[in-house]
Amino acid sequence: MLGDLLALLAGDRRADRVVPPTGFTARLTVFASAAMAFLAVFALALSLATGRLAERWSEELARSSTIRISAPPGQVEVQTQAVLRILATTPGVASARALSAAEQRALLEPWFGPDLDLSALPVPQLIDVVETAEGFDAEGLRLRLAAEAPGAVLDDHTRWRRPLVAAAGRLEALGLMSLALIGGATAAMIVLAASAALAANARVIRVLRLVGARDVYIARAFVRRFTLRSMAGAGAGTLAGMAAVALLPEPGPEASFLTGLGFVGAGWLAPLAIPALAGAVAFAATRFAAFRTLKGLT
Amino acid sequence: MIEFRDVAYSYGGGELLTGITLSLAPGSFHFLTGPSGVGKTTFLKLCYAELIATAGTIEIFGQDTRSMSRDAIARLRQRVGVVHQDCEFLDHLPVDENIALPLTVSGREAQIGNDLDELLAWVGLRERRHALPPELSGGERQRAALARAVITSPELIIADEPTGNIDWEMSLKLLKLLIELNRLGKTVLIATHDLNLIRAARAAQASARVLRIRNRRVEPAGAEL
Ligand SMILES: Nc1ncnc2c1ncn2[C@@H]1O[C@H](COP(=O)(O)OP(=O)(O)O)[C@@H](O)[C@H]1O
Ligand SMILES: [Mg+2]
């Protein structure tokens, strides 16, 4: 099999000529491979992008929830201590910590500039809560906070972000499944095209067998052809797909919470594997079709 | 070289050939004759494993054709030169590439060259070497088929009515080529219903033997030929 692959890449013009040109199936193979490669680029972009998204979101998920305390100036410190006490005894809370004034200023800096005097503003005190893997009971915590620290509000972003992470993960899996389906459809299409080409050349194959050609020799002539065509078609389709992805509008920095659908950095190399994969699929598919058909001919 | 042991063949109806036991020795020269439809082509096809006996065993080069793999049959055919009765070619390749085909498909391209030119001259197709097979006359096809059969210098040459479409002069020339190859040690088996050809061959090659198909059996022909 490996020897065949090497012989195939080395090429053999004379052996190619023993099978007449198969114009129609040839063009269909090139076209179908190009179309499949084009689709594969998007499926790949989708699964890479959703993979990035899921990773980013779950990172933030793991980070924290936030409790905001808005109270008259004299009350803030008391309520903060009360909240920290509650959190220390809440199951599912790994750690909790009040942000310092400097940290809060850093958070606000992008909006108000560096010269902000926090004490002049009724800025709520923030408490960073890190959950354990199981998470805490948000409703129970809210009830206790309402009773002991009426100014505290639990900002529970994990609750709405978790299904998003799950959806992104699912979308990534769907993208990968689409890639597999595209590969399978390409294989099926090439098996059909190669079988048609073989059937159309039954007389040629008969003559070749009569003069002593072995099945591998005959198969190779077809395999080489379909593999090269499929790679050429897939190459064109991949370039077109990559160009289309490159031309997608960029999300601005405000949307950094989302992620661009395109490829990032070395990710641009990933679609270049598509033509090689198409070639491998065509090689295996044509080989399968050829040996199956040849066994039925004398 | 070829051993038939109690061989029978049937295309599905009654047995066309039956009870055949014979052997073709290496270096022998045989004609096979009999009226049209008697089974000459069928017998030859059994000799190069295009057909497999329905009963009995046939050994070619010491191998039982019934148990041979497709690959083994291909390799066997690389050692046998066959002029098929229907002379099929690859219609998209010119005559010279068709004649060289047995070398091409068996990885012996390097041998194509002088042999091919000489052979083209021998069969009188030098001028027609770039023609496509569909452009050839019946006689030209048969000459090309003979050239294709002998280009590998095979140990065994089987020809099915090789002179059916050629004039007498060219027939003698082809016969001379086959006799020449036989003198070089090749085994030759020719099916023909042309008794004149057989007589001419016996005049030139005293060791030529004649087999005849009669009553579904292959038997040595008497001296009446
Ligand atoms: N593929 C086939 N299927 C069924 N019958 C066949 C087939 N080939 C030949 N025959 C029959 O077998 C008989 C012998 O044919 P063949 O061997 O070609 O005779 P010959 O070469 O002596 O003229 C004929 O009656 C022919 O019709
Ligand atoms: Mg015949």
Image: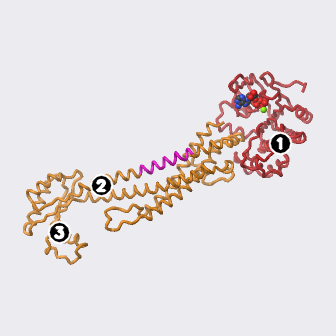
* Amino acid, disc 3: Ser
* Amino acid, disc 2: Leu
Q: Is residue B120 visible?
A: yes
- Location of mark 1 (residue): B139
Query: Mark 2 Cα within 10 Å, few/some/many (few <14, many 20+)?
Result: some
- Location of mark 2 (residue): A164
Residue B12 drawn above or below residue B165: above
Disc 2 to disc 3, how far (Cα)?
31 Å
Quadrant showing the C terminus of chain A: top right
Disc 2 to disc 1, how far (Cα)?
80 Å
Q: For chain A, give the colour.
A: orange
Dominant secondary structure of the residues highlighted in magenta in the image:
helix
The answer to whether marks 3 and 1 mark residues whose Cβ atoms lie closer than 8 Å is no
**Residue sitting at the far bottom:** A115
Residue B176 locus on image (x, y percent): 88, 40
Q: Nearer the viewer, residue A225 or B150?
A: A225
Q: Indicate the secondary structure of the residue bearing disc 1.
A: helix
* Amino acid, disc 1: Gly
**A164 relative to A122 in the view: left or right:** right
Task: Please name which of the two marks, 2 or 3, marks the residue nearer to the observer.
Answer: 2
Q: Which chain is red?
A: B
- Please state the chain letter of the residue tagged with numbered disc 3 in the rendered image: A
